[in-house]
Image (cartoon, helix red, strand yellow):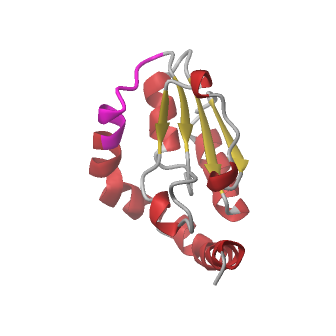
Amino acid sequence: MDSRELKDRELRSWTAVAPGWRKNDAALREATQGVTARMLDLAQLAPGHKVLDIACGTGEPAIPAAQRVAPDGFVAGTDLVPEMIAFAREKAATLRVTNIEFRVMDAESLLLNPDSVDAVTIRWGLMFMPNPLRC
């Protein structure tokens, strides 16, 4: 299976499970909050930082990152799955987190000036990428 086929399979799979992630969001956030907090601690996020969160799914850990870098910091969350990004946007709006933007993007095709961010985070996404080193 080539890279494109693997990405298409992942997209179909995550699109299919997106409703379950939405339904179980509170439990999933609670179950992963320790890992999220530790990762954000290790990233040394502080108010005013600019952060890229890759494979943010339903907004985790992008939303907690945005809360840490507020009020003047900013987080860009990316994910391959439009349904996940749609829910992430809804969650951020409900929580009134405004220093965040979500984009549907392929993590292996990001074009980014390294000087444009203070930190890059990715919690689980690498294991789903055909070429994680490219990411």
Which of the pair 23/134 is nearer the observer? 134
Looking at the rendering, in which quadrant would you find the N terminus? Answer: bottom right
Where is residue 117? Give x, y as percent: 56, 26
Q: Give above or below for 72 relative to 57.
A: above
Q: Give above or below for 73 relative to 51.
A: above
Q: Is residue 92 magenta?
A: no
Name the residue located 40 percent from the left edge and 62 percent from the top edge.
28
Where is residue 29? Give x, y as percent: 40, 55
Left or right of residue 52: residue 102: right
Where is residue 92? Give x, y as percent: 60, 41
Q: Residue furthest bottom?
A: 1
Q: Give above or below for 109 relative to 69.
A: below
Q: Quadrant of residue 15?
A: bottom right
Name the residue located 45 percent from the left edge and 38 percent from the top edge.
64
Q: Quadrant of residue 3?
A: bottom right
Name the residue located 30 percent from the left edge and 50 percent from the top edge.
35
Left or right of residue 46: residue 131: right
Q: Give above or below for 14 relative to 42.
A: below
Left or right of residue 38: residue 92: right
Q: Looking at the image, how many numbered discs can be counted on the residues?
A: 0
Where is residue 91? Give x, y as percent: 59, 48
First to last magenta residue range: 39-47
Name the residue located 46 percent from the left edge and 35 percent from the top edge.
65
Which of the pair 132/39 is nearer the observer? 132
